[in-house]
Amino acid sequence: MSWRLPDGSREQRAYRIRGDAGGREWDTGWIGSDQSLFRAHGGPPPVSGERVRCAVRVSTELGTSDWSAPLTWETGLLAPEDWVASWIGPAETEVPPPGFRPAYHLRTTVTLPGPVARARVYATAHGIYELFLGGERVGDAELSPGLTAYRDHLHVQAHDVTGLLQPGEVVFGAILSDGWYRGRTSYHRLPDGFGDRTALLAQLHVDYEDGTTAVFGTGPGWRSAAGAVRGADFFDGVEADLREELTGWTLPGDVPGEWAPVAARPAVAARLVSSPAPPVRRVQELPALSVTRLRRDRHIIDFGQNLAGWVRLANLGPRGTTLRLTHAEALRPDGDVDTAGGTATLRWYSPPRGIQGDRVVSAGELGEVFEPRHTRHGFRYLRVDGHPGEIAPGDVTAVAVSSDLLRTGWFRCSDERVNRLHEIAFWTYRNQECDVPTAEITRETSGWTDWGYNVRGARLLHDVSGLSVKWLADLAADQWPDGTVRNYAPDPLGPGSLTARFAIPHGQAGWGDSAVSVPWEIWRAYGDEEVLSRQYASMTAWVERVARVARENRHPARRSARP
């Protein structure tokens, strides 16, 4: 627990916490300490699905405060035996080629015999998932469960879904795509870094008003089908044919499409844990500032700000209209988008939909909207090819998608140029913070370890404690046995891969130093002693590796010199 001191006080002398967990009450009594960050709540270890209430009061130089308003939180599923659901995946007879892998729909129908008093759903995936219950999407998180060291641990998301459930038949479903798990990653754009089959694990706990309970989960009774999204990838973008939309698939009854029984997936060895990082969300929407028609079927839209995310496009044209969306950070002198982005690296890539490209075929339905939620682009400008009419500024919106971090720092001065420079820095950090600290938003989707350089600047603008702690766990999990820290974490390909041996050398000074510098900076900024304890083995392994290299790999001309 962490808390702020009462207004006007500057020195805490002691604190006291009281709480209740499932009827088990406690009171720590007064604890002499000036620490108000990351303090243990002092109660008994919670059990799975337990609701906990805590309150704190402090003694300062101004006297003793009142009790704070109570803080309420709830545990997830803490033990493997709490899971009755099993891992399932879409019914793929073979793995489609990269860039042409659909976002699959998975569903089952459950029957609720009476009014629901309380309901929780827990879910995670190998890939990216969106969850649906009772005809509604669950939560507002994007790109769940995020990027993690899948071989070691996997993050589970929990949601209160009480308000989505009514007695009777309810569809429990999800949309599942490649994401970071088997999509193309990092500069090498190699697919299947963590595995070549996507999978879903989801479990619904229902408490009825009559006191009975029920648990529903993924398993053999589920079915899957490919829908409108025929390709989804961070690099290759999204390809969707809205004429193939599985209308009504989140509601009971017959639905269109070729549905088949799901495939069973093996249980994972990775630990199922919660993430200390805030979820990825739509953090801001930007209207189009201008729309320029370069030629009959080509429009250029300017949003006035470089961002990471996607666009929401209405007015898709008559049925069968094929629109190609190209995202870019700059314009060429002729007014068209510059897809090279000023770097030769982008020219190496030949994804099926072009650089940072999406493609959509219109169904011609009234109110039709395209929003590609299973990818992420870096752009200020959007080019739309293939529209037969006019695209108005109100038809298109840019959606910034990043970790939903609490903003903690602002800056203003009398010189608007300096203010704008600071705003550019703010957007740069926001764009790079997407469940892991990334390095670049158009051609990288990995957690590059230059976060060790950037964390001190980032913490001036956002609370990056949870994001950093989450990423450090990934870094430690994928650290090589000899202490080497790879240039990005999580590591999709592992120490034996071609890129690990022949690409950019790993274990570089500055980059690998983040194993030590990031936990140190988080402790300096937030007083989190636990992060030093948790990361100590990783920190010392890196330092010992550096010392060993310095001692044993000296240049031949200097080997006779004393180390």
Image: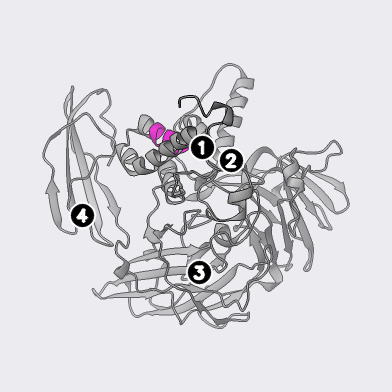
Pointer 3: what residue? 199
Looking at the image, residue 542 lies above or below residue 194: above
Which secondary structure, mark 1?
helix
Gap in Å between the C-alphas at discs 4 and 3? Answer: 32 Å
Q: Is residue 18 above or below residue 200?
A: above
The secondary element bearing badge 2 is classed as loop
Residue corresponding to mark 4: 45
Q: Earlier in the sequence, mark 3 or mark 2?
A: 3
Compute the Cα span from label 1 to label 2: 8 Å
- Give the mark nearest the N terminus, 4 or 1: 4
Work out how far the residue at label 1 is from the one at label 3, CA to CA, in angstroms. 30 Å
Q: Which residues are drawn in magenta?
A: 514-522
Q: Is residue 349 left or right of residue 447?
A: right
Which of the two discs, 1 and 3, sits closer to the camera?
1
Q: Depth check: 357 or 289 in front?
A: 357
Residue type at tag 1: Trp
Which residue is under mark 1? 451
Residue at 79% across / 45% down in the picture? 300
Give how far across and how far down residue 451 sits, in percent.
51, 37
The residue depicted at 49 percent of the width and 24 percent of the height is: 561
- Label 2 sits on what residue type? Ala
Q: Position of residue 163 (x, y in %)?
A: 39, 64
Q: Residues within 10 Å of mark 1 (few under 14, many from 20)?
A: many
* Discs 4/2, front: 2
Q: According to the image, label 2 marks what residue?
A: 439
In what quadrant of the picture does the N terminus appear? top left
The label nearer to you, 4 versus 1, is 1
Mark-to-mark CA distance, 4 and 2: 39 Å
| In-front residue for pair 369/172 | 172
Label 1 near label 4: C-beta < 8 Å?
A: no
